[in-house]
Image (cartoon, rainbow, N blue to C red):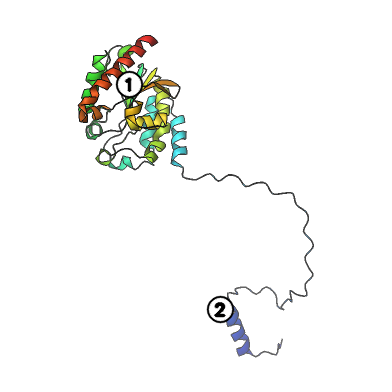
Amino acid sequence: MDSGMDWHAARAALEWQVELGATDAIQDTPVNRFEAAPPAPARAQAPAAAPAAHVPEDDPIAEAEAAAAGAQDLGALKAAMAAYPHCDLRRGARNLVFADGVPGAPVMIVGEAPGRDEDREGRPFVGRAGQLLDRMLDAIGRARDADSAGHAVYITNVLPWRPPQNRTPTAQEIAMLLPFLRRHVTLARPRILVLMGNASCQALLGRSGITRLRGHWDEALGLPALPMFHPAYLLRNPQAKREAWADLLELQARLRGAG
């Protein structure tokens, strides 16, 4: 059919349409949209439901909570921590430092983070600070390797991996791994918590300032909690051993009172 447009003009018009982005011919003849019938009025609709709350696809704390809750015993908890991918400290650490001592012991000691010796051996409190801790515990008839569970202790840290250069744990690292620590306490079933250092007080009491907190009983996770100086602090500040001895005697008295 002769449209009144020669072949060259038609081709030029088509090329121009292609340059504008047209890819498909819908109809043979154009449609004047101004002459088209107006659309029918929209029907009233029920108010739309509120959008669902956005759940982050990658929430390290939520993942830690789920992994910790799924651990039914200490072995499963250790495996869950080893599989947890979000804490960058694991990349520079040799070992995951989980715990030492006797699960079910009346006293659970919570330190801050592994040091070089702990990272190498995979056990908490095995360096100079750990040797001092063992002497402190022996002074009140306690030991991590005691034959009797009633005289034993169980030891862990807030963080299972060594921070670079033994730096102080960050608030983000503490928050990320706190679900595992809470579950650890639940599964270990102690009667008393000893919080050694600022990081453990921050994690379980929500406060720091160990020089003010030490020696004063508090409560953490529903258990009596006694903040104490970390043995590493005592090595740097021997004059503080007097206060540490007083705290040990307070712990001993509480244990005797608890039967």
Point 33% across, 25% down: residue? 214
Q: Is residue 40 left or right of residue 235?
A: right
Q: Is residue 230 visible?
A: yes
Q: Nearer the viewer, mark 1 or mark 2?
A: 1
**Label 1: how many Cα within 10 Å (few below 14, some 14–19, many 20+):** many
**Label 1 belongs to which residue?**
154
Type of amino acid at the residue the image marks with label 2: Glu
User: 154 or 68, which is in the foreground?
Assistant: 154
Marks 1 and 2 in Cβ contact (< 8 Å): no
Front residue of 161/8: it is 161
Q: Quadrant of residue 90?
A: top left
Tell me if residue 214 comes above or below residue 25 in the rendering.
above
Q: Quadrant of residue 44?
A: bottom right
Return the residue at label 2: 19
Identify the disc placed on residue 15: none
Residue 132 position, x and y percent, is: 22, 23
Instruction: Give amino acid for label 1.
Output: Tyr
